[in-house]
């Protein structure tokens, strides 16, 4: 991946709450990373380590306490609908609108001219294999189909950047596998920069060009691992020695951090905090 | 989709039981007054009541009272909808205001507001105004509470994703907050309508110069039992029609 830099994150830290408050949380510490055009970066790490926080800072939904983020050469100061589209874990489709209307609404919000919307909605629904379900309401679809629809909405916005926060996190293993394969095919045709949060090691290795492993809270990127394998990746990749080796490498990196995170939350008296950041439930 | 046929059959079945129950009740009424010697002063004979009912409809005698009652109801409902939805929306904009007002309104809603009637009669007299005031007060609470709930607890992801796609404040309201809140608000409005109707007719029987409730009490005082029962049946029919209309409006609004 030698493309130009699409996302530039420099020394970003984020704290929730005031310094002396009991609920003060240092969610993200001095994190820097670049994401190139055409690259898919996976974020993986113990839950609560700040992956969603980083994603939301990049997307302009959260203002970092310190540090800077640049997207397409511009500093991020708030949502940038022309450059960045989101796919959340769940509940991002409006249940009172059909799948088609949901996709259309996204483009209305973004400011796409009316004449273009219809065509773009159709094409993106086609791309995710949901053309026949355009007139269904989200409640009439399976969880996997809802996430396809959310992806179609994001694709229809034709942004250079796609941020996905555990988009398949609420799905069963099989559905998640199929969606991953389809996503790999879809993405091989675009040159979007994609940041993809997951807690599945296999998903990370299968989808990513690079995987950033987070340390326990306060989170920061501990190590970045490259997955040198062209897209679209076929299902055989999963059974290859290379895949297994990468997966094992990730596992051992993560293992220590998860232990650390667990013992810390045990010391804090169990459950720890539950964030209310967008789309986050893990 | 799948179980529709079955569900239709089941609902037709329970409909049949409901109808049978009402028919049984009528039959019991007929037998009790014609064969078991129940005093016609306490319980008039159903056939007589039926002819009184026909007479009320034919002469159009009910029209003035109906106008009074419906006028009171419409005014009270319009005022409580406007104030309830506006205030509810404004309160829902701030977590602080929600924390202050939601328990407060819920608390007041739980007291028997009918107790204000003597006060309203002193303030507004025996005419329609006191009934309007009572109906407004009573229906305000379910409406304001459901509006707060509707706007105040919209799934956060809807809002965040709309914002991330560039929705303006107006678009957020029109395409996200309003459709999310509408079903809840409509339910509150239906409840408000029902309690307004009940309290207005009820208070007409206690202190009033005109209206359907007033007419019923007037007939009771003159011991004109058959005609009084006919009026009760008339009010029940009106209430049933109004509630059906309001419920189907609610269902229509939900689907939108
Ligand atoms: N709105 C918030 N207020 C306070 N703390 C938060 C908020 N959002 C997240 N946090 C905390 O910040 C930390 C990082 O959260 P998050 O980025 O959601 O983690 P991840 O996505 O990696 O699971 C967690 O400890 C979480 O409890
Ligand atoms: Mg998260």
Image (cartoon, helix red, strand yellow):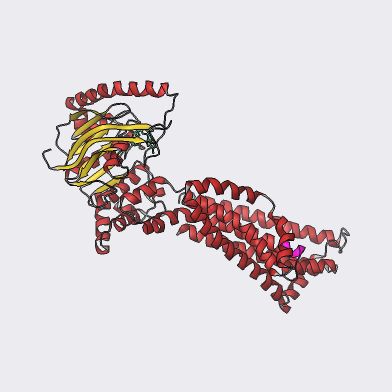
B175 is higher (above) or lower (below) than B70:
above
Q: Is residue A272 visible?
A: yes
Q: Is residue A186 visible?
A: no
The furthest residue to the left: A2
The furthest residue to the bottom: B59
The furthest residue to the front: A20
Q: Is residue B9 magenta?
A: no
Describe residue B169's horizontal placement relative to residue B54 as left or right. Answer: left
Q: Position of residue A174 (x, y in %)?
A: 32, 35
x 12%, y 38%: residue: A1
**Quadrant field for ligand 1:** top left
A124 is higher (above) or lower (below) than A46:
below
Q: Nearer the viewer, residue B76 or B193?
A: B76
Q: Position of residue A63 (x, y in %)?
A: 31, 42
Main secondary structure type of the part rendered in magenta: helix
Figure disc tally: 0
Q: Position of residue A98 (x, y in %)?
A: 37, 55
Q: Is residue B204 magenta?
A: yes
x 68%, y 55%: residue: B113
Q: Position of residue A4 (x, y in %)?
A: 12, 43
Q: Nearer the viewer, residue A73 or A96?
A: A73
B247 is higher (above) or lower (below) than A229:
below
Q: Which residues are magenta?
A: B203-208
Describe residue A261's horizontal placement relative to residue B139 as left or right. Answer: left
x 37%, y 58%: residue: B171
């Amino acid at each position: 991946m030698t493309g130009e830099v699409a996302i530039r994150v420099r020394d970003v830290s984020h704290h929730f709450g005031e310094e002396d408050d009991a609920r003060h949380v240092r969610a993200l510490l001095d994190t820097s990373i670049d994401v190139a055009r055409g690259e898919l970066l996976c974020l993986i790490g113990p839950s609560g380590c700040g992956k969603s926080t980083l994603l939301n800072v990049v997307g302009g939904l959260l203002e970092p306490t310190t540090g800077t983020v640049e997207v397409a050469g511009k500093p991020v100061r708030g949502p940038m609908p022309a450059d960045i589209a989101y796919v959340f874990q769940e509940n991002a489709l409006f249940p009172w609108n059909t799948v088609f209307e949901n996709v259309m609404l996204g483009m209305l919000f973004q400011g796409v001219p009316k004449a273009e919307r219809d065509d773009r909605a159709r094409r993106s629904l086609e791309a995710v294999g949901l053309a026949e379900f355009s007139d269904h309401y989200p409640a009439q679809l399976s969880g996997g189909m809802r996430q396809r629809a959310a992806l179609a909405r994001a694709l229809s916005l034709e942004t250079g950047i796609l941020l996905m926060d555990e988009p398949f996190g609420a799905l069963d293993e099989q559905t998640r596998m199929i969606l991953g394969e389809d996503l790999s095919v879809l993405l091989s045709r675009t040159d979007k920069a994609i940041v993809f949060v997951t807690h599945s090691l296999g998903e990370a290795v299968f989808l990513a060009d690079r995987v950033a492993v987070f340390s326990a809270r306060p989170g920061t990127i501990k190590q970045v691992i490259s997955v040198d394998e062209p897209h679209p990746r076929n299902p055989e990749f999963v059974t290859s020695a290379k895949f297994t080796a990468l997966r094992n490498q990730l596992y051992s990196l993560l293992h220590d951090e998860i232990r650390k995170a667990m013992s810390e939350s045990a010391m804090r008296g169990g459950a720890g905090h539950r964030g209310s950041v967008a789309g986050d439930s893990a | 989709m799948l179980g529709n046929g079955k569900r239709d059959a089941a609902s037709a079945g329970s409909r049949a039981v409901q109808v049978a129950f009402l028919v049984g009740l009528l039959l019991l009424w007929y037998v009790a007054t014609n064969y078991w010697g129940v005093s016609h002063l306490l319980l008039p004979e159903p056939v007589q009541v039926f002819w009184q009912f026909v007479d009320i409809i034919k002469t159009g005698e009910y029209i003035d009272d109906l106008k009074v009652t419906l006028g009171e109801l419409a005014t009270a409902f319009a005022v409580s909808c406007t104030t309830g939805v506006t205030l509810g929306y404004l309160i829902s904009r701030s977590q602080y205001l929600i924390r202050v007002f939601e328990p407060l309104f819920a608390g007041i809603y739980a007291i028997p507001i009918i107790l204000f009637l003597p006060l309203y009669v002193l303030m507004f007299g025996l005419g329609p105004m006191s009934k309007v005031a009572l109906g407004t007060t009573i229906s305000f609470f379910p409406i304001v509470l459901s509006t707060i709930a509707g706007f105040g607890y919209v799934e956060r992801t809807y809002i965040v994703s709309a914002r991330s796609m560039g929705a303006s404040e107006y678009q957020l309201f029109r395409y996200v907050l309003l459709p999310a809140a509408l079903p809840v608000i409509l339910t509150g409005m239906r409840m408000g309508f029902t309690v307004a109707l009940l309290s207005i007719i009820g208070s007409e029987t206690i202190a009033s110069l005109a209206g359907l409730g007033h007419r019923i009490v007037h007939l009771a005082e003159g011991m004109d039992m058959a005609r009084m029962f006919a009026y009760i049946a008339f009010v029940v029919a009106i209430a049933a029609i109004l509630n059906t209309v309001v419920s189907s409006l609610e269902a229509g609004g939900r689907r939108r």
